[in-house]
Image (tube, coloured by chain):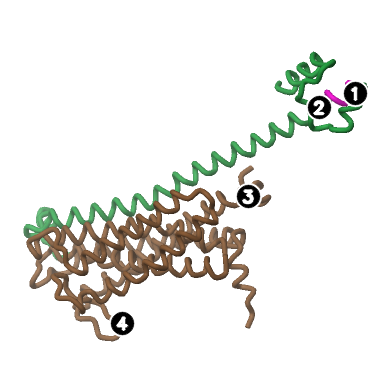
Chain colours: A green, B brown
Amino acid sequence: MYFDSWSGFLVMEGHGLYVWSAYTMALAVIAYNLIAPFMARRRILAQLAAQVRRQERLVQRKVIVNEVTTSRGDNNENRSANPENTQLKHRPGRQEEGSESVERSAQ
Amino acid sequence: MNWTFFHKLGSPKWFYDISGKWLPWLQVSSLVLILVALAWGLAFTPPDYLQGNSYRIIFIHVPASFLAQSIYMMMATAAAVTLIWRIKLADMALKVMAPVGASFCILSLVTGAIWGQPTWGTWWVWDARLTSMLILLFLYIGIIALRGAIHTTEAAAKACAILSLVGVVNIPIIKFSVDWWNTLHQGATLKLTEKPSMAPEMLWPLLLAILGFYLFFTMVMVLRLRIEIISRERKTRWVKELVS
């Protein structure tokens, strides 16, 4: 140890303020570099988890819609020809049926 | 020659797996080295005969400056790899290195200013070394801003790679500024070709601090790169399995 006392270590013969502020700045930069990745990691993982949940919901919704449309029987020829379009669109003649299936699928 | 390692290096998943094993070692070694070196430099080395105790700033200023320039060189290398071989991982590395380099560039400039006040009697002069270092900071900020401004990943990668390569011209200017111009900044303390002009009791903590800072940068870069990989590969199956 070069310095005799704590006060000598802090004052550093008049250069203490310069030396300590430089070292504080170094500490701040090191802390930033340590904290920033962990914050980013938390944010990205939350985003990805939300994405996975959203996809799972979508899959579930599709399953419900499919069950509804298949259980109703094949009284509509349009549906079998174009299965994606019929499920959410209101067609003349079966408007109530259509809105019902949308409501069910939303649950 | 066997080139499979090169293709492996380009695979984000491979890097993610292997870097998880490096991380604990990097974290422990870098933090221990920095702590030992800075405590040594602060409390155990004798003061400089000319500058007194203010010279202790060297144990931060020199590693930070070295790192700011080295990170830029690594970014330029990654930029060349991005443009030539179109390796995705190189562009991710280019992206994550920029904020780290900028932070060490700021540290170098601020500690230099703090050191300048007791030594030269001024915080700042527009001399060649200081000005070229400031330009390096602007280059870092420019690269970060450019990426933020372009939304398509591929276009951003190309633009940032080109800017990084153009900016390399600044690195030799920083390096040789103290020789080419009559600057206030002192000449290089450490040279690869000559024996160092520093006393060994000051040189050892400085070398340890440089090594510690480089390891710290490697650790931070690996941390950030792993996050960037997860973010960009979010559509792949291995990332989905990792998250859920």
User: Badge 2, how many Cα within 10 Å: few under 14, some, many 20+?
Assistant: some
Real-space CA distance between mark 3 and mark 4, rounded to the nearest whole angstrom: 44 Å
Q: Report the span colored magenta.
A: A68-73
Residue B229 drawn in magenta:
no
Say which residue label 1 marks: A76
| Mark 4: amino acid | Leu
| Mark 2: amino acid | Thr
Real-space CA distance between mark 2 and mark 3, rounded to the nearest whole angstrom: 35 Å
Say which residue label 2 marks: A86
Q: Which SS class for mark 4?
A: loop
Residue A71 drawn in magenta:
yes
Q: Position of residue B173 (x, y in %)?
A: 28, 73
Mark 1 touches mark 3? (CB < 8 Å): no
Q: Which of marks 2 and 3 is in front?
A: 2
Report if residue B173 is visible in the image.
yes
Does residue A96 appear to the left or right of B32 in the view shown?
Answer: right
| Mark 1: amino acid | Asn
Say which residue label 4 marks: B192
Say which residue label 3 marks: B239
Q: Main secondary structure of the magenta part?
A: helix
Residue closer to the observer: B208 or A101: A101
